[in-house]
Amino acid sequence: MNKYMPIGNKFPHILHGGDYNPEQWLETPNIINEDFRLMKLAHCNTMTVGIFSWVALEPEEGKYRLDWLDDIMDRLAQNGMKAVLATPSGAKPPWMSQKYPEILRTQADRLKDLHGGRHNHCFTSPIYRKKVSRINRMLAERYGNHPALILWHISNEFSGECHCPLCQNEFRKFLQNKYDNDLERLNHEWWTGFWSHRYTDWSQIESPSPRGEHETHGLILDWKRFVSHQTIDFFKNEIKPLRELTPEVPVTTNLMGTFPGIEYRELAKELDVVSWDNYPTWHTTEQTDWKIGLRTSFVHDLNRSLKQGKPFMMMESTPSTVNWQKTNKLKRPGMHMLSSLQAVAHGSDTVQYFQWRKSRGSFEKFHGAVVDHSGHENTRVFRDVAQLGQALEKLDEVVGTTAHSQVAIIFDWENRWALEEAQALARERLQYEETCISHYAAFWKQGVTVDIIGAREDLSQYKLVIAPMLYMTHPGVGERIEAFVREGGTFVTTYWSGIVNENDLCHLGGFPGPLLGVTGIWSEEIDTLHADENNSLLMSENFLGLSGSYRVMDFCELIRPEAAQVLAVYGDDFYQGRPALTVNRFGKGDAYYMAARTGEEFLDDFYMALMEKLSLTRTIETKLPIGVTAQQRTDGQYRYIFIMNFNSKKEQISLNGIYTDMFTQVDKQGVLELDPFDVKVLKAKAK
Ligand code: GLA
Ligand code: ZN
């Protein structure tokens, strides 16, 4: 048996609960009493407390008020529940902004924010850092040994940047450190001879202006790196007293999926467990639900991969609706169970909500919650939550298990920063994230597990590594990909790869730069098609068993095979007949190059052929209808298989063996019927 420890070491259950702000209800103790009655009924076992509670904890500078939190922590413990305890730095009290304006954030136009909102402090301000550190120390001293405490939740959804003089200073220090105090090196790496931007003194360097797109690209890229670095540095300062006083209590902070502002792989290194907030736009008219489902699966897989397979937490989700989407639709019957178990399917050991109870006033009073303004349990949403809670109680043995992938897709933060900044092609159609998801889709449809990794990660455990638009190549990446393929790995990359180095300077001597050898092609030019234009890819003789023609769009690279073999050619335009898909035998492995952006049809067929060629393991060896996926977790002894129907109609699959239904304990074989938005959890012996 091979399992990770449960998040709370001595609490081997899937955590079920949500953000709870009793400090908003201190004048109505009967409501708090009701909360505890309802938590039991909802089968919740954990509450996240203290988020945005600073003014309730420290109403005046240095004067703490903790009686209410003592009471809540004690009552959680008495009820056999656990507390995820947050540090309050996500929002600061007005008295603090008034007394210490330094802590307010400064925008890119150098205007200082007024007090208001949240998530808006300076990440550098020594005063704010000191205040945060002090209140965190106090919380650790007070609750460090509390029986309810299971985890620290640091701040809330770190984001944004500050352009104040303190931050400018730190930015310069960051650059001096990066470029070994050598201004000439910085000038070279940023190519500042362009438009007369050469710096002659460090003091001339400032963060990018709001007219950033005409800014030096090297500057923009390093600024993004600095913002990420400074946020992580702030985080490290936050956890110092917690590490000192409660070294055995794990820490996390709630991430936001593919949020571009912070290099999450760097931040993840500082966390004991990864957690994220999941708010898919279910039931929109723009996209079918299964496409939203597959995008959500991609992000869950990313979160599992941030710590190399360690189970993560879905720290927030809504039990019904949010209040900030363009159209705030209710979850249709079945969707709450499905979307919650989807997280578990991909490796989450929790299902948590924003929020337990609707706030009576202000910004989120109409955001979905377990308990509505009506205040009782006789609601559809409450029943959905309670039903899910009961289901989760049957999944204790899934806690700590994980997925093992033979396939990895590279989705790299710094690559994305550089790629999306470059003035080229058709910027709004580059869509790095969408492109990675389009490759992922082919595997999701077949129920093949995928890891979502960074360009600097170890590749040796995978059979297949896919790097769509790997525009930027970090030092050493080319060599590592070569080593992976030489040893027998299969590598797939696409147009617009190997273009720049880590500081956004173009590779000289031909694209794809460090991937020239492994791909065995040279990319001479790239054509951008109009949004309504297409070309086609005609399959040549090939060992993949593909034939006919496929639609291509957006970007068509004109490549020259050097060592590579041509698998397909273009069907139209002046480059008709020139290679569009190649493969290069390199050592014991193969490297494929897709010169053009292909549609779903090609990706489905191409990856299906690779799945067969490489004998990749599918979760369940059966045909899945479109919109249905199967994902699994295992401890080596048993496999827990989640079959999920994201369609609003019934589907069926035929099982290839006997499986036990985890909820009914009934053995299933033959045809498995799936209701609209249905999910089944099946157990089988691992092979
Ligand atoms: C974010 C925040 C929560 C809440 C929700 C609403 O995830 O972390 O505090 O505002 O959004 O969807
Ligand atoms: Zn600042």
Image (spheres, rainbow, N blue to C red):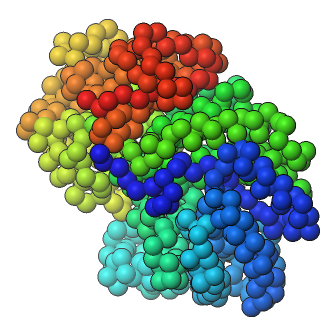
How many numbered dots are placed on residues in this image? 0
> Foreground residue, 281 or 473?
281
From the top left corner, tell me how far across and down residue 448 is, in percent. Answer: 36, 29
Left/right placement of residue 166 relative to residue 250 reads right
Measuring 43% from the left and 38% from the top, which residue is drawn there?
436
Q: Determine whether 550 is above or below 257 in the image.
A: above
Is residue 132 among the parts visible in the rendering?
A: no
From the top left corner, tell me how far across and down residue 595 is, in percent. Answer: 31, 30
> Foreground residue, 417 or 137?
137
From the top left corner, tell me how far across and down residue 336 is, in percent. Answer: 66, 34
Which image quarter is the N terminus in? Answer: top left
> Foreground residue, 139 or 207?
139
Measuring 19% from the left and 51% from the top, which residue is drawn there?
480
Q: Determine whether 91 is above or below 214 in the image.
A: below
Left/right placement of residue 171 relative to residue 26 reads left
> Foreground residue, 182 or 127?
127
In terms of image quadrants, where is residue 451? top left
**Residue furthest left in the image:** 587
Left/right placement of residue 10 relative to residue 131 reads left
Which image quarter is the C terminus in? Answer: top left
From the top left corner, tell me how far across and down residue 25 is, in percent. Answer: 86, 64
Measuring 55% from the left and 22% from the top, which residue is drawn there?
645
Measuring 79% from the left and 52% from the top, which residue is drawn there?
37
Is residue 667 among the parts visible in the rendering?
A: yes
